[in-house]
Image: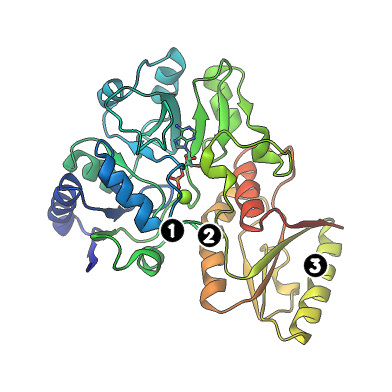
Amino acid sequence: METKIISVKEKSICGKAVEEAGRIIQAGGLVAFPTETVYGLGGDALNGESSGRIYRAKGRPSDNPLIVHICRMEDLFPIVAQVPDTARKLADAFWPGPLTMILPKSDMVPRETTGGLDTVAVRMPMHPVALALIDAAGGYVAAPSANRSGRPSPTLPKYVAEDLDGRIDMILDGGEIEIGLESTIVDLTEEVPMILRPGYITKEMLESVLGEVRVDRTVLDGNSGQPPKAPGMKYRHYAPKGELTIIDGRQEQVVEEINRRAREMQEKGERVGVIGTAETVGRYMADSVKSAGSRDDGKTVAKSLYRILREFDEEGMTVIYSENFGTAGEEGIGQAVRNRLLKAAGHHIDYL
Ligand code: AMP
Ligand code: MG
């Protein structure tokens, strides 16, 4: 299959491209498109065969459900069995935006889309191209991140092409993504709403609207022994090709230890990459040293993390060391960054 790549950065071509992409999805095809979080791989959410194609293109296990993207609030009602008050409040506060809600599904949503579950994940994204595409595609677009399963989510169109060229019908190129981490997922079928995947919309933001909110234990502690409630969170995710280890401790010690290990690995013939911060990046010695941003600004770290992991792949790094970002009880976006970094490292973290 030839994958057509069309820029949607200019308004004059965007309308036509989105119309064509919408027709492709309506006919059962697959289109990658920009959202504010990461690039998504879209198919018709109400067509079980389209969902099957998404799983195959990504190499994704079919028990890992897809998020259904909508572009109008009224489109929520037909696909869910009920809309609790909590969902209305969250939609008012955060839609369109990087928040996914888990709700009981209606019969309209095929089981292929929900990985066999009775619940459905729904989000209304904010990116104008995403909203226009969902509308053009008939209102319901199933869209996981547009990467091969297990790879870092793409924040640039070239990474979508790297993973999916020849496997999907079209890529809408909207340039670099704004947020860089996947949406927050909140389960509203629980008595107390529960965060299954942290993201840009933080626990504190949800609590300001809902009152008490819990966090799935597995999000913070990969060794809790429990299965996560979001099936996708059990897989090793977001992983670079190089062996990634997180080193946690006091800044001075971390820099020293990473430099020591980097030297040792280089002597063994490994190519070593280091992820530091603006504050420390000048003090590392390795084959490739990158700053994830400022330690005080979780948003810049969120935006650069997946890009850095992909760049290390391009540069052929075989061993990667990263400083840790945030701490276990961390609030705000730091919790999401920490969660993704831990998963990328397969929970390989050394405390000094
Ligand atoms: P991605 O599409 O790559 O952003 O991943 C979607 C995430 O949402 C995965 O971790 C899924 O397991 C999770 N998810 C989707 N639908 C549900 C659902 N009905 N219940 C729990 N988690 C879900
Ligand atoms: Mg994904």
N-term mark: 3 or 1: 1
Instruction: Using the numbered discs, state the Cα–Cα distance from disc 2 to disc 3 in whole angstroms.
Output: 22 Å
Instruction: Using the numbered discs, state the Cα–Cα distance from disc 3 to disc 1 in whole angstroms.
Output: 28 Å
Around disc 2, counting alpha carbons within 10 Å, would you say few (fewer than 14), some (14 to 19), or many (20 or more)?
many
Write down the residue under mark 1.
155
The percent position of residue 164, horizontal first and vertical second, equals: 35, 64
The colour scheme is: rainbow
N-term mark: 2 or 3: 3
Numbered label tally: 3
The percent position of residue 211, horizontal first and vertical second, equals: 59, 17
Instruction: Using the numbered discs, state the Cα–Cα distance from disc 2 to disc 1 in whole angstroms.
Output: 7 Å
Q: Is residue 54 above or below residue 214?
A: below
Left/right placement of residue 200 relative to residue 48 reads right
The percent position of residue 312, horizontal first and vertical second, equals: 57, 72
Around disc 1, counting alpha carbons within 10 Å, would you say few (fewer than 14), some (14 to 19), or many (20 or more)?
many
The quadrant where residue 317 appears = bottom right
Picture residue at 37% right of the left edge, 24% below the top: 105
Left/right placement of residue 88 relative to residue 234 reads left
Picture residue at 63% right of the left edge, 32% below the top: 216
The percent position of residue 7, horizontal first and vertical second, equals: 24, 63
Write down the residue under mark 3.
255
Q: Is residue 282 above or below residue 58?
A: below
Picture residue at 25% right of the left edge, 35% below the top: 46
Question: Can residue 30 be seen from the camera position used here?
Answer: yes
Write down the residue under mark 2.
306
Q: Is residue 288 above or below residue 63?
A: below
For the residues bearing labels 2 and 1, Cβ distance under 8 angstroms: yes
- Give the amino acid at mark 1: Thr
Around disc 3, counting alpha carbons within 10 Å, would you say few (fewer than 14), some (14 to 19), or many (20 or more)?
many
- Give the amino acid at mark 2: Tyr
Q: Secondary structure at mark 3?
A: helix
Q: Secondary structure at mark 2?
A: helix
